[in-house]
Amino acid sequence: MSDTPRLPGLTSAEADWLVQAAPAVGAERGFPPLAVAVVDLTGEVVVLRRADGGMPMTSRIAVAKARTALLALRSSGLIQLPGGIVDSIQHLYGGDFVPWAGGVLVTDGDVILGAAGASGAHAVEARRPYRWRCGGGRRAGPADGRVCGEGAPRRRALPLRGR
């Protein structure tokens, strides 16, 4: 065991589950191949996965959407700012500020554990509410209340689609 302190937040198993579950649900709903990213509290990538056939640019966009949710402390699709302010913030954060649907916080109650971002669906699809309920107190993703299957972490993950 290491004496190095660990940041609070998601475990790698939870992050892996999120990036595996989201593309599967997207495929069920007829979305194009998605890229899904999970970032820790510092905004650094924990896991990034792009489905087969996904556009290469969706990987970077998924990371940027996750970081946007973390920076704004809300789902990226709920950010409403004038274009000039968005441009300034994008400049400050090196382009990693994307105020469009697809980025969400991952929480345990009121405690932020990290964020997740998804990219690859069209804007209309990205606005659909999307949540999973997976036991425990953490939230992440379908609003239909679907219970996650075997192997899902005993936590909840937050909407992987921007609502």
Image (cartoon, rainbow, N blue to C red):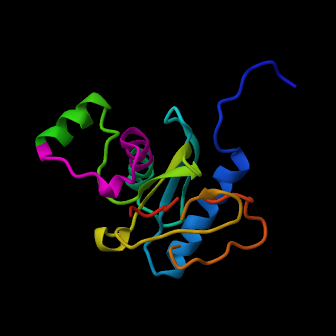
User: Quick one: quadrant of the N terminus?
Assistant: top right
Q: Residue at x 58, y 59 (%)?
A: 139
Q: Residue at x 52, y 35 (%)?
A: 44
Q: Quadrant of residue 95?
A: top left
Residue 77 image offset from top left, x and y in percent: 32, 58
Residue lying furthest top in this view?
3
Q: Quadrant of residue 23?
A: bottom right
Residue 116 image offset from top left, x and y in percent: 51, 52
Q: Is residue 77 left or right of residue 150?
A: left
Q: Which residues are magenta?
A: 65-83
User: Which of 83/59 is in front?
Assistant: 83
Q: Residue 78 magenta-drawn? A: yes
Q: Is residue 94 left or right of residue 63?
A: left
Residue 39 image offset from top left, x and y in percent: 53, 42
Q: Residue at x 16, y 39 (%)?
A: 85
Q: Main secondary structure of the magenta part?
A: helix
Residue 117 image offset from top left, x and y in percent: 46, 53
User: Quick one: quadrant of the C terminus?
Assistant: bottom left
User: Is 39 drawn above or below residue 22 in the view shown?
Assistant: above
User: Which of 23/146 is in front?
Assistant: 146
